[in-house]
Image (cartoon, helix red, strand yellow):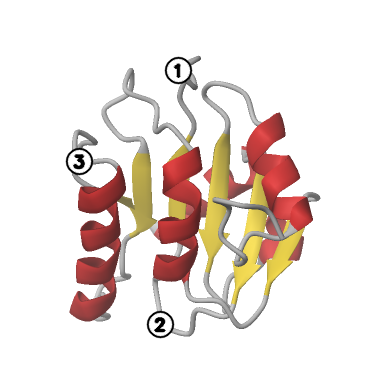
Amino acid sequence: MLKGISPLLSPDLLSALYRMGHGDEIILADAHFPGETCNKNVLRADGLRIADLLHAILPLFVLDPYVPDPVLMMAPVPGDELDAALLAAYRKVLAQHAPDAPAIQFIDRFPFYERARSAYAVVMTGETAKYGNIILKKGVTPLS
């Protein structure tokens, strides 16, 4: 345990967040996501909800202000719906920790998988809501 660091963040996840560079992306994936298929750097956060992880990560993580879409989610396929409560939970955490960030953008399933292939890491969570997957693009961390 570390003072000021959420106990939800494992040593491996903290290391990944620290090692990521400007423009690198991390995927917080729901329990349905094919993480092992999409990326070699898979971290486990079983049992944790993505909104809770966002709340733990965002105080330590600067979203890239130089792109229009530093936060992306997988768009539902036609005929499916995104869980409105899940989206509201993500937006609430973003408003608290990254109020100047642009609105969450959505990309289709297969382009999302392609982004996951080139992401720095995929964090497999216990999130069971469909389309709970989210991409965070890291910005430059200020010195102070």
- Kind of element beneath mark 3: loop
Mark 2 highlights which residue?
A: 129
Which mark lies nearer to you, 1 or 3? 1
* Residue 124 - label: none
In the rendered image of this protein, does residue 64 appear above or below residue 45?
Answer: above
Seen at 31% across and 35% down, the residue is 69
In the rendered image of this protein, does residue 38 appear above or below residue 139?
Answer: below
Q: Position of residue 76 (x, y in %)?
A: 31, 69
Mark 1 crowd level (few <14, some 14–19, many ≥20, 10 Å Cα): few
User: Are dots 1 and 3 in contact, CB under 8 Å?
Assistant: no
- Kind of element beneath mark 2: loop
In the rendered image of this protein, does residue 64 appear above or below residue 129?
Answer: above
Label 3 amino acid?
A: Pro
Cα separation, mark 2 vs mark 3, equals 24 Å
Q: Position of residue 78 (x, y in %)?
A: 26, 72
Label 1 amino acid?
A: Ser
- Kind of element beneath mark 1: loop
Of the numbered discs 2 and 3, the one sitting upstream in the chain is 3
Q: Quadrant of the C terminus?
A: top left
Q: Position of residue 53 (x, y in %)?
A: 49, 63
Quarter holding residue 24: top right
Can residue 105 be spotted in the picture? Answer: no
Cα separation, mark 1 vs mark 2, equals 37 Å
Cα separation, mark 1 vs mark 3, equals 18 Å
Seen at 58% across and 70% down, the residue is 33
Of the numbered discs 1 and 3, the one sitting upstream in the chain is 3
Mark 2 crowd level (few <14, some 14–19, many ≥20, 10 Å Cα): some
Side of 103 where 39 appears, left or right: right
Mark 1 highlights which residue?
A: 144
* Residue 99 - label: 3
Seen at 52% across and 24% down, the residue is 23
